[in-house]
């Protein structure tokens, strides 16, 4: 990172700041000339006209906020990536953003009067707790591999499900934070800037003191300790400082992703090699990225005639940029492998007693759905009336079929890619269907309701095609697939916040649907879902030989006469059809496609056919009980089955990862 290149970067930030200040004038065919803006900034002229007042109290503080928050997020991302030696580390991927956002939403709901005074400490506490959970899962010595990012994704989904549940249960309190949660930089005065500025006072200290500590940490634990550095306290202190910067930013403007992830990677691509150079370059690049992103958000707002939050624009630009960056610089294999240990070893089939227990759990869930009746705050067993049955059977069929279908899709995807982390939700396949449905709903309104399944199918197929292309370039390495899931998930979250930020009843309906609910499943949809699930499950079982051969390796499969390309396309088409079918009926449901295949394998189902059948049974039972718990736990208030299964499945998955680390002799998952 030469001085000339650094000076050019400073000039670029200054130019973007000037362009940002002129955006309002460029879009409105007016505005103040640069000389007049300079006079106002230097205090040589008192604002009098509307244009001058708008510049001093709206445009100028907005540009300052973009500089402060962008610089803080860039610095935070660089610190996290250098500390963990992981190019994917950032507040977005390490769960700190989700933890901070959950804490802020809870504060808005239960202690709204304390938001202004205690918003940043609450966000810091939430971010620290989320990161502490991730460290507990992976272990302090395993922070530089794929398990760190996977743990962060799982924690993100888990905390996101809890946050969504809080919003749904306290609509009247939480709807006011929708626009803020989408990452909005619009300012009405200097209050927010003056509030944030002292809380970023730790940044200059980090720029001066952190480079030497980071240089020592690059020597490894033993090398740094030999030179007198207390490694664990230094690591925790720097990580806490970085989380504080991210938390203060989130408390001020909401969640803005990708800036902290992209800025350090761009800094290294520009030649920043030393810790200090990377910190300074990431800070400048973060400010430049957020200035450019906010300018594009303002431009998009004029096209859509609506407010486009900066967080949405950052996700729309950051997701493709992250995918492009991963194609150029991501290694084909990970430094730390990922697998799950344990289970019924030495058997290739599930024990009959286990199958009987699974079948019993499924039947008991069916009976609970049908026969448990609420009356006067109590519950009793009774046959449902004709009206109750007409309401319940579509929900019952949807939960049963969705669980089985997603388990089959997850099993096919894991065996096809050869990756235990592959699932429709982790890799963004379900997100593709959801994105297509939400986007079509925004563009065409209720007219798209008659074509939900084809629209969802197109979204799933598009994501699968992108994953197939990206995975082939890196040998289907877990890291290359996980990074695509990170990008698509963040993009979907930003789109959801944009829908909610519109502040209409339809926006709240979008959130209800995105929680994975059986509330709105009509009889026709339930029948279509049931028929599709039977057909696709039978197709998966019929193609189990292909899965077995592909699991043994593509060379082995070709030697046995299998056309691997055609087989892969057919199996991926089954996954896309399944995800589109389920998502169009009840919205996105997470973790079922990830947990059910693992549970089937742990129970002894090692062959493809056995894992497909057992996984379908596990998924059906899991969704049945999640839907019943959601209906009864807080009756008469109901929680969507997708939220319940995210919490249950996320907790199970975290326990599985922790157990794998504790059983490993090296402390790795």
Image (cartoon, rainbow, N blue to C red):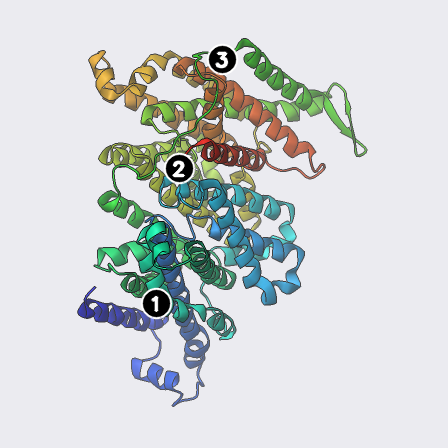
**Label 2 with label 3: CB-CB less than 8 Å:** no
The spot of residue 667 in percent (x, y) is 43, 37
Q: Quadrant of residue 230?
A: bottom left
Name above or below for residue 576 compared with residue 192.
above
- Residue, x 23% and y 68% (percent of image)? 6
Image quarter (top left, top right, bottom left or bottom right) of the N terminus: bottom left
Q: Position of residue 34 (x, y in %)?
A: 30, 80
Query: In front here: 480 or 23?
Result: 480
Q: Which residue is found at the position 61% from the left and 47% from the top?
A: 166
Can see residue 502?
no
User: Which numbered disc flags the more N-terminal residue, 2 or 1?
Assistant: 1
Is there CB contact under 8 Å for labels 3 and 1? no
Image coordinates for residue 237, horizontal then vertical, percent: 46, 59
Disc 3 packing (10 Å; few <14; some 14–19; many ≥20): many
Which residue lies at the image location 51% right of the left edge and 49% below the top edge? 132
Whether residue 226 sits left or right of residue 599 in the image: it is left
Residue 350's tag is 3
Kindly report which numbered mark, 2 or 1, lies closer to the viewer in this rendering. Answer: 2
The residue at which mark 2 appears reads as 428
| Distance from the alpha carbon under mark 2 to that under mark 1 | 36 Å
Q: Is residue 106 above or below residue 666?
A: below
Alpha carbon distance from label 3 to label 1? 66 Å
Query: Where is the C terminus found, in terms of image quarters?
Result: top left
The residue labelled by disc 1 is 27
| Residue 346 marker | none
């Amino acid at each position: 990172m030469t001085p000339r290149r650094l000076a050019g970067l400073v000039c670029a930030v200054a130019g973007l700041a000037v362009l940002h200040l002129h955006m309002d004038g460029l879009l409105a065919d007016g505005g103040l000339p640069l000389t007049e803006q300079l006079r106002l900034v230097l205090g040589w002229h008192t604002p009098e006209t509307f244009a001058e007042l708008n510049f001093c109290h709206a445009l100028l503080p907005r540009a300052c906020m973009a500089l402060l928050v962008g610089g803080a997020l860039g610095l935070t991302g660089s610190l996290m990536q250098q500390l963990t030696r992981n190019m994917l580390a950032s507040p977005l991927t390490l769960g700190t953003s989700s933890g901070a956002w959950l804490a802020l939403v809870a504060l808005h709901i239960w202690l709204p009067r304390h938001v202004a005074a205690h918003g940043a400490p609450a966000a810091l506490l939430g971010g620290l707790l989320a990161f502490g959970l991730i460290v507990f899962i992976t272990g302090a010595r395993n922070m530089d591999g794929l398990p760190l990012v996977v743990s962060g994704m799982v924690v993100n989904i888990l905390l996101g499900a809890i946050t969504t549940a809080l919003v749904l249960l306290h609509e009247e309190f939480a709807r006011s934070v929708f626009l803020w949660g989408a990452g909005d930089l619009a300012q009405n005065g200097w209050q927010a800037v003056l509030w944030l500025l002292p809380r970023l006072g730790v940044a200059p200290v980090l720029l001066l003191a952190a480079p030497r500590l980071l240089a020592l940490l690059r020597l490894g634990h033993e090398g740094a300790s030999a030179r007198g550095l207390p490694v664990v306290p230094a690591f925790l202190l720097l990580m806490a400082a970085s989380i504080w910067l991210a938390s203060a930013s989130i408390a001020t403007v909401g969640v803005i992703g990708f800036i902290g992830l992209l800025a350090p990677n761009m800094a290294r691509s520009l030649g920043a090699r030393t810790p200090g150079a990377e910190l300074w370059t990431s800070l400048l690049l973060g400010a430049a990225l957020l200035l450019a992103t906010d300018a594009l958000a303002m431009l998009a707002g004029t096209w859509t005639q609506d407010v486009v939050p900066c967080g949405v624009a950052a996700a729309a630009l950051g997701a493709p940029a992250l995918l492009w960056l991963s194609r150029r610089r991501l290694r084909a294999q990970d430094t730390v492998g990922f697998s799950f240990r344990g289970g019924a070893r030495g058997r290739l089939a599930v024990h009959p007693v286990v199958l009987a227990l699974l079948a019993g759990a499924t039947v008991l869930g069916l009976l609970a759905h049908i026969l448990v009746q609420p009356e006067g705050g109590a519950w009793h067993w009774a046959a449902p009336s004709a009206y109750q049955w007409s309401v319940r059977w579509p929900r019952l069929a949807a939960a049963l079929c969705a669980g089985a279908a997603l388990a089959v899709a997850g099993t096919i995807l894991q065996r096809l890619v050869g990756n235990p982390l592959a699932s429709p939700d982790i890799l963004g396949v379900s997100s593709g269907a959801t994105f297509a449905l939400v986007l079509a709903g925004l563009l065409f309104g209720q007219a798209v309701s008659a074509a939900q399944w084809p629209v969802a199918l197109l979204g799933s197929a598009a994501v699968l095609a992108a994953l197939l292309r990206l995975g082939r370039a890196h040998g289907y390495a877990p890291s290359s697939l996980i990074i695509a899931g990170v990008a698509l998930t963040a993009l979907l979250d930003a789109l959801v916040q944009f829908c909610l930020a519109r502040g209409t009843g339809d926006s709240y309906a979008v959130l209800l649907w995105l929680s994975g609910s059986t509330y709105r499943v009509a009889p026709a949809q339930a029948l279509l879902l049931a028929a599709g699930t039977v057909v696709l499950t039978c197709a998966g079982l019929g193609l189990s030989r292909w899965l077995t051969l592909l699991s043994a390796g593509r060379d082995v499969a070709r030697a046995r006469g299998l056309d691997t390309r055609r087989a892969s396309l057919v199996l991926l088409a089954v996954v896309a059809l399944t995800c589109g079918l389920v998502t169009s009926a009840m919205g996105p449901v997470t973790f079922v496609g990830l947990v059910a295949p693992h549970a089937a394998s742990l129970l002894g189902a090692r062959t493809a056919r056995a894992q497909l059948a057992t996984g379908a049974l596990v998924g059906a039972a899991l969704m049945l009980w999640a839907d019943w718990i959601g209906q009864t736990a807080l009756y008469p208030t109901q929680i969507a089955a997708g939220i319940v299964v995210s919490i249950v499945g996320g907790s199970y998955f975290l326990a599985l990862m922790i157990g794998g680390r504790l059983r490993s002799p090296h402390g790795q998952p």
